Amino acid sequence: MEIKAIRGFNDILPDEIGKWQFVEKTAREVFEGFGFSEIRIPILERTELFARGIGEATDIVEKEMYTFADKSGNSLTLRPEATASMARAYLEHQIYTFDPVAKFYCIGPMFRYERPQKGRYRQFYQIDAEVFGVDNPMVDAEIIVMLIHFLERVGLEKLELQINSLGCRKCRPRYRQEIINFLKKKSFQLCEDCQRRLETNPLRVFDCKVETCQAAIVDAPKVIDFIDRECQDHFGKVKEYLEAAGLTYILNPRMVRGLDYYTRTAFEVVSYQLGSQNAVTGGGRYDNLFQEIGGPDIPGIGFAIGMERLISLLPKDKVFIQHPHLFIAVLGDETIKKAYQLINQLHLEGIRAELDYEGKSLKSQMRRADKLKARYVLIMGEEELKKGRAVLRNMEDKSQEEIPIEGLLNALKEKVRRKV
Ligand code: ATP
Ligand code: MG
């Protein structure tokens, strides 16, 4: 039987890779321009890191983690997100002793055992950016500005930035109680999961996609009405800084985000072109995460962009496939060696050139050049070669010219590069 990939795990094929490379390159350029450095963290971590960092009563930890015991019996987990690992690395290497502020980004695969569907996979890619060590609201705005700038740079349109404040350790318990009281009266309307969430993590009901649960929370108390003075001031400043940067946002009092560690500012960017899996990116402040994983009291804020969803939104008219610059059509055994030498030189110069390996007819070689969308074809026939010449055909306008073999490399470099 033919072996197939695991459900929810995708191949990213060469005809799509141009988009991925473009997105990654743009992220690196934009983020580095904002003073962020790349960090690469392991794909496997101790299960404890996520259980404590993300929170036991979250969807991720409750049911989405790829957890297994290794040969020594340690419980390990394929990372479902990057923030906890980045925080761990920051603590483990005492990066804070160098400078209290750290700005990191990370690009790579995450793993969650979810039901695969459009926009939702079991291995998916994220671009993450985090700032550790600052609780100043200026940084909340700064990271959101960077995110929006990046999304615009890759060409996304019709996005909506939603923000909310989730309060802090001091004021959230009061809200939590309020929500429990409110939802208890509606518990008959809640799905089985949410009945359980009511006990363990009532805010999670907001994230539930079941219709009756959504209906139950329509007039639920809003977190924003319960946050304390300090959190209000903080949120007020975030909004001021966003406005100062010229960003428009929507206040979404129902956005509570899936993870336990979020405090104060929470944000999401949604696209109405995505259907039900509409969040392209989400993030927020997490001022308790470091302590949860055994570190000192260090604040943090960050976001994670889902690359598959982002890529599905890229402008359709943009071309990402790299076609050959040149196809060399060879006729006659004598010429093959010459063509081989030439193509090696071209490759060393970074010119994408292709050759026929199968001794096919000129017609069939031309067909292949056409299929590969090569910009030029160099026809090297025995007759022409004897005269010290070869024929260069421009596949776009179909014009042809003879060019001397002497200095062929330079002539080709000149032509092919002109329109890169
Ligand atoms: P959702 O509500 O869609 O499950 P989430 O809150 O679980 O999202 P985060 O943990 O905030 O998502 O991850 C950030 C981004 O990663 C999401 O906005 C989304 O674009 C992407 N993402 C999350 N889970 C998946 C998945 N299983 N497959 C593909 N992309 C995903
Ligand atoms: Mg999720």
Image: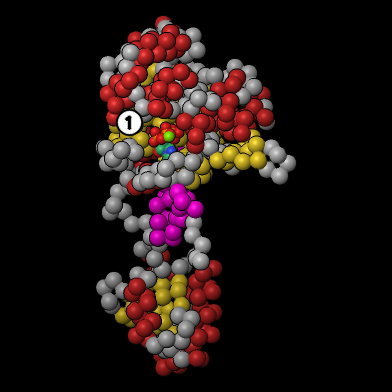
Which quadrant of the figure has residue 256?
top left
- Residue 181 position, x and y percent, is 37, 10
Q: Which residue sits furthest top?
A: 229
98 sits to left or right of 123: right
Name the residue: 61% across, 30% down: 49
- Camera-side residue: 93 or 5? 5
Q: Residue at x 41, y 75 (%)?
A: 327
> Can you say which quadrant of the picture contains the C terminus?
bottom left
Tell me which corner region of the image, top left, top right, bottom left or bottom right, holds residue 380.
Answer: bottom left
Side of 112 relative to 266 (left or right): right
Q: Position of residue 388 (x, y in %)?
A: 45, 88
Query: Dot 1: few (<14), some (14–19), or many (≥20) neighbours within 10 Å?
Result: few
Q: Is residue 44 above or below residue 252?
A: below
Inspect this view and state whether residue 163 appears.
no
Residue 218 percent across, percent down from the top left: 27, 20
Q: Nearer the viewer, residue 231 or 394?
A: 231
| The residue stretch that appears in magenta | 6-33
Which of the four quarters of the rendered structure image does ligand 2 lie in?
top left
Residue at 40%, 60% (x, y): give it. 15
The amino acid type of the residue labelled 1 equals Val
At a point 52% along the width and 19% down the height, the residue shown is: 287
Is residue 91 or residue 354 the one in the foreground?
91
In terms of image quadrants, where is residue 52? top right
Please, is residue 35 above or below residue 402 in the view? above
